Amino acid sequence: MSWGTELWDQFDNLEKHTQWGIDVLEKYIKFVKERTEIELSYAKQLRNLSKKYQPKKNSKEEEEYRYTSTRAFLATLNEMNDYAGQHEVISENMTSLITGELTRYVQELKQERKSHFHDGRKAQQHIETCWKQLEASKRRFERDCKEADRAQQYFEKMDADINVTKADVEKARQQAQLRHQMAEDSKAEYSSTLQKFNSEQHDHYYTHIPNIFQKIQEMEERRIVRIGESMKTFAEVDRQVIPIIGKCLDEITKAAESIDHKNDSQLVIEAFKSGFEPPGDIDFEDFTQPMKRTVSESSLSNSRGDGKSEPKFGGKSKGKLWPFIKKNKGAGPEDFSNLPPEQRRKKLQQKVDELNKDIQKEMDQRDALTKMKDVYIKNPQMGDAASVDHRLAELGQNIEKLRLEVQKFEGWLAEVEGRLPLRTDQARRQSGLYEAQNTAAVNSCAQDRESPDGSYTEEQSQETEMKVPATDFDDEFDDEEPLPTIGTCKALYTFEGQNEGTISVAEGEMLYVIEEDKGDGWTRIRRNEDEEGYVPTSYVEVYLDKNAKDVYKSLQKISE
C-alpha cells in the first residue's frame, strides 16, 4: 500500500488532504489551549471561592471556628485550594506537553510538506517540458513530410510537362530531394525526442513521483501518530492528578466525619455560661400589716440585704438580675467586671496567656541580644558590645512591666475563681497602677461594681469585702523580722525602682541577696538595714553563699 503507486495521478488531491491534516492538528491544538484556559479559570474561581469564605483575621468569625463543624468547613476550604491547585497542574502540563510540543511540530510539518510538494511540482514541470519538446519535434516532422510530398508532386508535374525547360525540371528535382532530406532529418529528431521522453516519463511515474509521494505518506502517517500520542497525553495528564484529587476528597470526608455534635454543644455552654444560679422563689410580702417590709435575697430587686434603701441612678431603680440585663456597648473595664463570672474568668485567663506569650517573645529577644553582645565582646571587630546595652535595658523594663501586668490579671483571676491571692513579697512588687486600681475598687465600689442597669449583685459585694483587709495584711507583713543574707550580687545595669517594693541600683554596685528569684523574674536585695527591695533578676549577677542558702531553705520549710 503505497501512495506513489496507488495515487500516482492524485497530486492535487494529496496536496489538499495533507493541508487538511495540518488544519486538523491546529484545530486540536486550539481545543487543548481552550481546555487549559478553562482549567485555569476554574482553578481561579475555586481559589476565590475558598478565599471568600475563609475567616477574617482578628474578627468574630475566627472565634466561631472552634466548633468542630466550622473547623470541618475550614478544612474543606483548604482542601478546595489544593483541589484548585491540581487543575492548575493540569493546565500547566497540557500547555507544556501538548500545546507547546504540537505547535513546534506543526511548524516543522509545514516546512516538510512545502519541501515535498515543491519537489513534486518541479518533477511535473520537467515532464511537461519534455512533453512540449516531443510535441514540437513531432509537428516539425509532420510539416517537413508534407513539404516533401508537395515538392515531389511538383517535380513530377514539371517533368511531365513538355513545355517546361530542362533547367526548371532539374530545379524542381533538386527541391524535392532537399525536402525529402529535411523530412528524414525531422524523422530522426522526432524519434530521438520520443525515446528520451518515454524514458523521462517512465522515471517520472515509476521513480520520482513514487519517492516524493512515499515521503508525503510517511509525513502524514507521522502526523496521525503524533496526534494520537497527544490524545493519550491529554488523558494521562488528567489521570496523574486523580490520586491527589482523591486525597483532597478523602480529607474533606475525614473532616466531615470529625464533626462532634456533643463537643460543639459543650463549647456553646463554655461560650455563653454566665455562672449565675437561677433566681429563687420570691417571698410573700404582706401589705396588710403596718410593718417594715424587707425584700428577700432572692427577689428580683436584688437588694443589698442590709435594710438600706437601694441607691438609685438616673432617678430610676431597676430590679433585675444579671442574666436579664442588657450588655454594655463599647469598651468595658480592664478587669472585665462587666461580664458574668464564668465569662470573666475566661477573658482573664486569655489575657494572662497573651501576656505570658509577650513575655516569652521579649525574653527571646533579650537572649538573642545577649548572645550578640557576647560575640561582640569576643570579637570587637564585628561590632560594639555597648551598642546593645540600651536595647537590653529596654527589654528588661518591658519584661518587668509585662510581669506586673500578669500579676495584676492573675490577682483578678484568683478573685473570680474564689481564692484570695496571698499578699506576699511578690504582691508588694505590683505596679503603682495596679495598687491604684485596687484602692479605687475599694473606694468606689458602688460605681465600679455596679451592674449596667444600676442594680447590685451579691458577688460584687463579696468581691469588695475581699479587697478591704489587704491593707491590714500589708501592715502585719511590714513588722516581720528582716530576712538573713544568702549571698551577694553585682548590678549589671542601672535600674530605676519607681514602683512600690522595688529598689534603685547603679551599674557595678555590690549588694546583698536576701531572697533569690522564685521564678517570677525578681530577686530581693538589701543595700543596708533600711534599704531593701526587688530588682529584675536579669539586671544583677548573683553569687549565692551555699551555707546561707541551705539555712534559708530550712527556715522556709519550718515557716511553711
Image: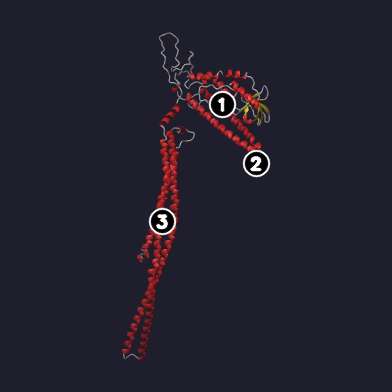
Counting residues from the N terminus, which is met first, the one under dot 1 or under dot 3? 3
Label 2: few (<14), some (14–19) or many (≥20) C-alpha neighbours in 10 Å: few
Vertical order, 192 against 211 (above or below): below
Q: Quadrant of residue 540?
A: top right
In the foreground, 24 or 210: 210
Left/right placement of residue 267 relative to residue 438 reads left
Counting residues from the N terminus, which is met first, the one under dot 3 or under dot 2? 3
Q: Position of residue 151 (x, y in %)?
A: 34, 84
Q: Quadrant of residue 361?
A: top right
The circle on residue 407 is 1
Residue annotated with mark 3: 226
Q: Where is residue 164 in the image (x, y as percent from the top left)?
A: 33, 90
Q: Can residue 486 be seen in this view?
A: no
Q: Where is residue 341 in the image (x, y as percent from the top left)?
A: 48, 23
The circle on residue 382 is 2
Label 3: few (<14), some (14–19) or many (≥20) C-alpha neighbours in 10 Å: some
- Amino acid under disc 3: Arg
Check the image and tell me how it is coloured. Answer: secondary structure
Q: Is residue 39 visible?
A: yes
Vertical order, 497 against 98 (above or below): above
Counting residues from the N terminus, which is met first, the one under dot 2 or under dot 1? 2
Mark 3 to mark 2: distance in Å? 64 Å
Q: Position of residue 278 (x, y in %)?
A: 43, 20
- Amino acid under disc 2: Met
Q: Residue at x 43, y 30 (%)?
A: 263
For the residues bearing labels 2 and 1, Cβ distance under 8 angstroms: no
For the residues bearing labels 3 and 2, Cβ distance under 8 angstroms: no
The circle on residue 48 is none
